[in-house]
Image: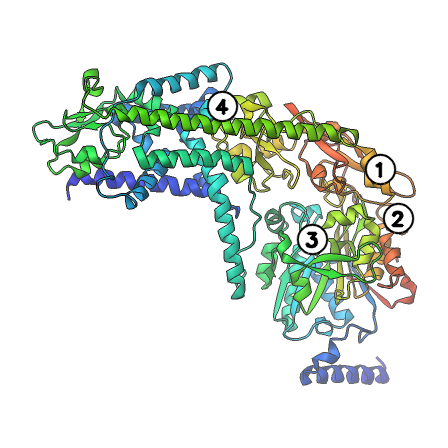
Amino acid sequence: MKSRAVLKSIRVVIALLVIIPLMFLFIDFAGYDLSSIRWLAKIQFTPALLSALSGVRIGLIILILLIILTLLFGRVYCSVVCPLGIMQDIFGRIARLFKSKKKRRYRYSRPLNILRYSVLGLCIVLFVFGCISLISYLDPYSNFGRIIQNIVRPVYIQLNNWAVTVLGWFDNYSLYFVSVNFEVFAFWFSFIAFVSLTVLVFMRGRLFCNTLCPVGGILSLISRYSIFKLDFDKDKCNKCGLCEMKCKSQCIDSKQQKLDFNRCVICYNCINVCNRNAMNYKLSWRVKPEDIQPDNVTDNLPIEPVKLVVNSRRRFLGTAIASIGTVTLAYAQQQQARNGRTKGYTKDSPIAPPGAKSIAHLKSRCTACHLCVAQCPTQVIKPAFMEYGFGGLMMPRMDYEQHFCNFECTVCSEVCPNGALQPLTIVEKKVAQIGKVYFVKRLCVVHTDGTDCGACSEHCPTKAVDMVPYRDGLRIPQVNRSICIGCGGCEFICPVRPFRAIYVDGNPEHEIADKPVEEEKKDIELDDFGF
Amino acid sequence: MKRRDFLRTAAVTGIAGAIKLGGADKLTAQPSKTSAGYDMIAVMNGTPEAMFQRAISEIGGMDKFIKKGDKLVVKPNIGWDKSPEFAANTNPDLIKAIIKSCLDAGAKEVVVFDHTCDDWKLCYKNSGIEDAVKAAGGKMAYAHEEKYYRKINLPKGQRLKETLIHEAILDCDAWINVPILKTHGGAKMTIAMKNYMGIVWDRRFWHSNDLQQCIADCSTYAKKPVLNIVDAYRVMKSNGPKGRSESDVVMGNALFMSPDIVAIDTAAVKFFAQIEKMELDDVSHIAKAQKLKTGTMDLDALNIKRVRL
């Protein structure tokens, strides 16, 4: 074993140390205290960039460190920090099991720079004009988050539930049932990304990272100026081609003894496989573009770009079908709401999670990684469908259908790596008004049936919903919107169907609620039983 | 002490001791008249633990209500993600004392659960009850999924004819109901009968089908708690059942114990009425339950022992 082989081992170990806890962060439902590993989400490139843009100092520091790392050793980020990159490597590893020895070999392919930099440019232009969607759909970390949250987590929970049943046969009750929060649209959205990515990995290794990935695009621009670069030792190399066969970025042309460093994700496979120690990190103070980009290569695989066209066509078709489905569904939903208006009501605004400041701010910073969705203890945060419009697809929204926001909790605002949800202290959270309550008396069971209820008031943490005397000794809800924070406890528990008699409408701009006025604490001396 | 009294006491004690030694558990487990003949014990001015110890010994000891080897459930109110000083959940020290007493009386296991309103993990933890139960040697049961509940019929129910009840209650040998005394926006008061809402799955049905009647209906469930113990150490006088701040809380420093759930709720409302205005008629599930013959509101007809520590 060569001493330099240790580089790859280090890469693999660090990569596993990143991806395993990060994955756990997205699938854990047991409410373990994972605050000590949340930083793994915050060291991701896009989140660091976006939070730096929001003025979060730590985001800026991380961004600078990532750039320095790339300037030193190239796109190390892509192999040991980026969870989607690591995931692709794992898939690539699995793919090998299904491939013949010959098919396992990678071959050099020309860079698809026009595609790569157009995608990056478009991401940036759209972002500048206020649309983060393209970044959100292509950002590797966010895609990883969505895949784990929407595909792996439901499977994990289902496995847990089966385990509960099996353990139950042996009178072991250490595990408990958890309902699978399966979001159909989010699932398909993530699933399409997942399948496309898997296919790409099986066929072309890390092609995604060097074409569609905006982070890969930016880092490749930086890695041109890296101080240490991998390169051939032309004296030692005998052009055996082993390195090329192992290069999942398909950036090594062994015949020409060229390595396209800005596509290299620093996996060290080439170093590992070379029998002649001909692949090395070299100090390269000077940038020699002709070394990096072998534009003169002509003898190579004319079929490759065609394949990509096929892929992009498929992708386009997929997107088109998804869009058509989306529009149809949204229309149907709107119709349903409209038809119900005679008996029900329509809500004006979706509800952004606490810390979002405003829907506009959320939509300018959120890349829909779904970490808040995954980490929310009450699972009240759901991926949006069309609630925020097309630009807000998959972004977190509060859904009070089956859950409500815990008064004593600030988890979502703490985990958000993008600064889309800004950290709230518990004191701030308790007055962070994300929406306001509306009471519909004509639907309320106290009014319609003349019986006691009070479920809404029961759940209200601030008593913005209070019970006041009504007829026949009954009490009916009365709302005080100024102290309501929009947690949704009332809407969640209201038993009236199909339209609940109390609901929360979102604040497009989050406001600060008044603090409830507390009575002075009375000391009552009781010295009798009263009966 | 008169000689006659002494002899009588000695005889009773001797017989009781003999029964206990003889292991005639069946005899002692009948929750009918207590040896002292009390239907209810009311204690004031002590810690939750001390008041419980006094009450249980006055009523005749835990082994009068449970058998050796019983699987028991102790059902507190753990509805909210609040710490004990907010009086939203049953006092953890009281739960600890009850579990210890059950285990000392030979219970095989003691299970504690509640179908919480706030997130169950946070409720179990922040109420202090999970820790108390574990320290006392009991077990927490899960109650957050419908799978843990099974359907039962309530033939005597007016509105609530069937409901899903937690399997721990269905499968146990006996259960002890340990509510805390609080106001309630809907039911007016939440005490022992209202605490049944934590053993059922679908509470929304109750709320939309005459809450007060449903509470009374559920109390007709044949498997009644062998004991009801009302924690009135801290009392939530306003903004119940969740409460908002510590100004909703007054020190009641009291505890009530009775096998009769209607009587104990009646007594607790009367006790509460000393703190805040509360009409017994407005807490209408109590009268409705009496009508269904779950128990009696006529406290004068009962033999109540009142103790001030």
Q: Chain of mark 2?
A: B
Secondary structure of the residue carrying numbered label 2:
loop
For label 4, the residue is A133
Element carrying mark 4: helix
Q: Are marks 4 and 1 on the same chain?
A: yes
- Please name the residue that numbered disc 2 is placed on: B282
Q: Amino acid at mark 1?
A: Val
Q: Is the residue A457 above or below the residue A262 in the image?
A: below
Please identify the quadrant where the N terminus of chain A is shown: top left
Q: Nearer the viewer, mark 3 or mark 1?
A: 3
Query: Nearer the observer, disc 2 or disc 4?
Result: 4
Q: Is residue A370 visible?
A: no
A506 on left or right of A278: right
Give the residue pinned by disc 1.
Answer: A468
Q: Are marks 4 and 1 in contact (CB under 8 Å)?
A: no
- Of the residues under marks 4 and 1, which one precedes in the sequence? 4
Q: Is residue B280 above or below residue A502?
A: below
Specify which label sits upstream in the sequence, 2 or 3: 3
Badge 2 vs badge 1, beta-carbon distance below 8 Å: no
Distance between mark 4 and mark 1 Cα atoms = 47 Å
The image quadrant that residue A233 belongs to is: top left
Q: Nearer the viewer, mark 2 or mark 3?
A: 3
Say which chain tag 3 marks.
B
Label 3 vs label 4: CA separation? 41 Å
Same subunit under labels 3 and 4?
no
Measured along the vertical axis of the image, is residue A496 above or below residue B5?
A: above
- Taking depth in this image into account, of A485 and A312 the one nearest to the observer is A312
Drawn side of residue A123 relative to residue B129, left or right: left
Where residue A182 sits in the image (x, y, percent)? Answer: 55, 42
